[in-house]
Amino acid sequence: MRLSTGLLALVAACLTCSAALAGDLKCHVTMGGTDVAAAKLILMPGAAMATTAPDGVGVFTGLAAGTYLVTAEKTIGGVLYGALKDAIAVQATGGATVNLAMTQAIHISQYMPLAVGSLWQYATSITTPTGTTTKTRHERAVGTDTIAGDTVTVIEVTWSGSPDVMKMYNRSSSQGYGVYREAHAGDTLDHVPPLRIPNVVPMGAAIHLASTIKHSSGAADQHMTMTCKLVSFDTVSVPAGTFPDCARIECQQKIDGKPGTMTLWLAKGVGQVRVFERKTNKRVKRSLEEYRIKPVLLRPLRVPRLLIPRPAAP
């Protein structure tokens, strides 16, 4: 009896310690100052989910101490609204409370499709102090690979008039969009950790990313930071056509302190239709010319027509 009582006391003590080492995260979701019920909350890392109550509050319980990112989303009248908060510090012996104000949003995975077999072709201009050159850039999703336990899509990149081949290893899924690896000219660059954009990207929310770039060539590691923000929905005309409601995303980045900017216009179900990049002494512009998205054929690349002879009349 004494042994049983002692065992129960030990179990109770362990449970108490476990509770003390876990924190809660309380999320209050509003839009226009009004509580939002039935909004879906997603916590990263870990992809835990919760739903807000009628008072707009949803709670994640028993979290280990650490830094988290949380998104909220709800479709109202056919329009997606969302909110995002990152760098949330949850203490082991306490909790945290965050307020999430929803604005119009996108699911980034719908704007960056990467189905194997898809192709994109871009008219590209590159301007440096020595002048401007033009090239045709071809991107093709050729297969999949596994990096850091995640299945990624391998995108093969080639340029007109050049034997160079670059491979990008990216992931587009219900968890968001991630940049994992790039291989070119005998050097493989791994992002550790991968640069991951959460699937819910609300208007005006700053998304902060950071990773270390590790080179297989033995070159020194590089530290990279990036901040991306959805700033507007624009109508964009390029050789491939006119695309309404393109998500315009502006990014500021630094690699070992060297600044650069990138502006992307993304069309839902298509991907990048226009890209402007600026680095020190270099400007790059890309405009979509042709594309083919698997499994749905949206605008085929030009290919020779197959002529099939008719059978001879009997």
Image: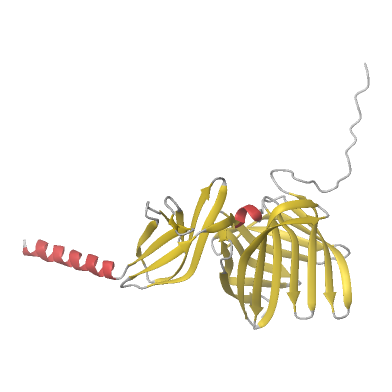
Instruction: Determine the residue positioned at 80% across, 59% down.
Output: 122
Residue 132, placed above or below residue 239:
below
* Residue 219 visible in this rendered orientation of the protein: no
Q: Is residue 266 above or below residue 313?
A: below
The location of residue 153, given as percent across then percent down, is 65, 57
Residue 129 image offset from top left, x and y in percent: 85, 81
Q: Position of residue 126 (x, y in %)?
A: 83, 71
* Number of numbered markers: 0
Residue shown at the point (40%, 54%) measured from the top left: 52
Q: Is residue 217 left or right of residue 82?
A: right
55 or 155: nearer the viewer = 55
Q: Quadrant of the C terminus?
A: top right
Q: Quadrant of the N terminus?
A: bottom left
Q: Residue furthest top?
A: 314
- Residue at image position (65%, 83%) is 257
Q: Residue furthest left?
A: 1
In this view of the protein, can residue 160 be seen by the observer? yes
Left or right for 221, reference 68: right
Q: Nearer the viewer, residue 309 or 238?
A: 238
- Residue 52 left/right relative to 9: right
- Where is residue 226 shown, x and y percent of the image? 61, 73
Q: Quadrant of residue 26?
A: bottom left
Q: Quadrant of residue 67?
A: bottom left
Front residue of 156 and 201: 201
- Identify which residue is drawn at 72% across, 48% down: 293
Q: How is the image coloured?
A: secondary structure
